[in-house]
Image: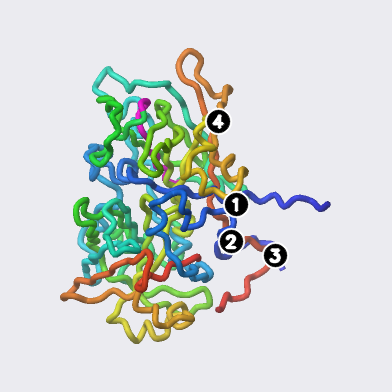
Amino acid sequence: MTQPLDYLKESPSQTAGPYVHIGCVPNFAGIKMYDGDLGASMKTGPVQGQEITIKGHVYDGTGTPLRDAMIEIWQPDAAGLFASANETRGTADPNFTGFGRTAGDMDTGEFTFETVKPGAVPWPDGRMQAPHITFWIVARGINIGLHTRMYFEDESDANATDPILTRMEHQNRVPTLLATKTADGVYTFDIHLQGPQETVFFDM
Amino acid sequence: MSLIKTQGGFITRDRGRQPDAYTPDYKTSVKRSPSAALLSFPSSISEETAPMFGHGMLGELDNDLIHNYAAAGESAIGPRIIVHGRVLDENGNGIPNTLVEFWQANAGGRYRHKKESYLAPLDPNFGGCGRTITGEDGSYEFRTVQPGPYPWPNRMNDWRPAHIHFSLFGHGFAQRLITQMYFEGDPHIKLCPIVGVLKSQEAVDALTAPLDMNRTVPMDSRAYKFDMVLRGRRQTYFENRKEGM
């Protein structure tokens, strides 16, 4: 016998279920609460940097768009600073929250984020990462939230030296992490839960 | 060398204790489960920061589901309960000032949602959601009515045990977690395919709240205690070598 290691264990995840909207975006679900839904707007005033729109769908393994998902994003401001108490490198744009949350359209499943193009942030060893946005997807049928990243197709120089993108074994899957520029300031980022175009999901 | 504790990256998530993505008894997971292996990397500042929400954003009734959707002078119908506990990290430290959101069916097992079709009636005084922010020791508390069990389309006769959904942030986005709380003694726990995605009885127990008579309000509300644990960060008294990959 040995002494027990007295660490606690992370609580097991359970699906967010079909009614995640009631708890996380109640106004979207028709329940008037809290003076609006958390994460509905990422800008609280004029923001620094380039304002962009991100649009996309989350597709299941049959190619059907999910219409009951909740998608969250977390990102730094245009200068690469996070609006977080853990940010020690400087003070982020006071008019930018960095946090977005949406259910997508109840009929089509399309999600939209009005945000800014993020600045680059460092990797733990000091190298710079390519600009990216963290995505987190929950829905009925997803037992534990899926974590991925959106990089920018038009940041090819930064992407070519990114510590994660360059270390992926299956380089042919890198495009699943790249947002496509469809108009000036507009990017499309589709997420495929399964199938030949399956998005790369992370365990970080 | 001075002994100053430094925080490293997040401790690797114990995927052996978390449910798998593909769990065919819970049918919806079949086409919504990634089949490739997850890509493992150490956390970086993108995962070690998180949105922080101030106590100032909370309304007075945000943590009182009995009254936060009720007409003036009225209240939700059902067994009155208090749910309380702490949000901790894997190192056993309380996580202060973090947002906790919760949602549930009403006492009859009916959700207030346009895609919900169960014949049990809505309670006009019950919305079904609330939120709070943890105190300095990671503690939280809210008041609600005990939700009812309800049938759901999976196999022909599946019922969810009574449960409350929780959404948690922590201080790093790597800690983001959604889970469910079950009630001690509910016979549906062992029959439910969603509970069934959990890999051990110990994991089921970790999501099952005991009746807590010490925190009941006599002649008013019973209480259930539910602690939740989010990922912790590596801690060391030694200076970390830079974490290259």
- Chain bearing mark 2: B
- Chain bearing mark 1: B
Numbered disc total: 4
Q: Nearer the viewer, residue A178 or A113?
A: A178
**Residue extending furthest toward the front:** B156
Residue holding disc 1: B90
In this rendering, would B109 be left or right of A3?
A: left
Region of the chain picked out in magenta, as a range: B98-108
Q: Amino acid at mark 1?
A: Glu
> Secondary structure beneath disc 1?
loop
Q: Are marks 2 and 1 in contact (CB under 8 Å)?
A: yes
The image quadrant of residue B207 is top right
Residue B184 - label: 4
Residue holding disc 3: B2
Is B106 covered by the magenta stretch?
yes
Q: Is residue B137 visible?
A: no
Lower sequence index among marks 3 and 2 = 3
**Dot 2 alpha-carbon crowd within 10 angstroms: few under 14, some 14 to 19, many 20 or more:** some
> Secondary structure beneath disc 2?
loop
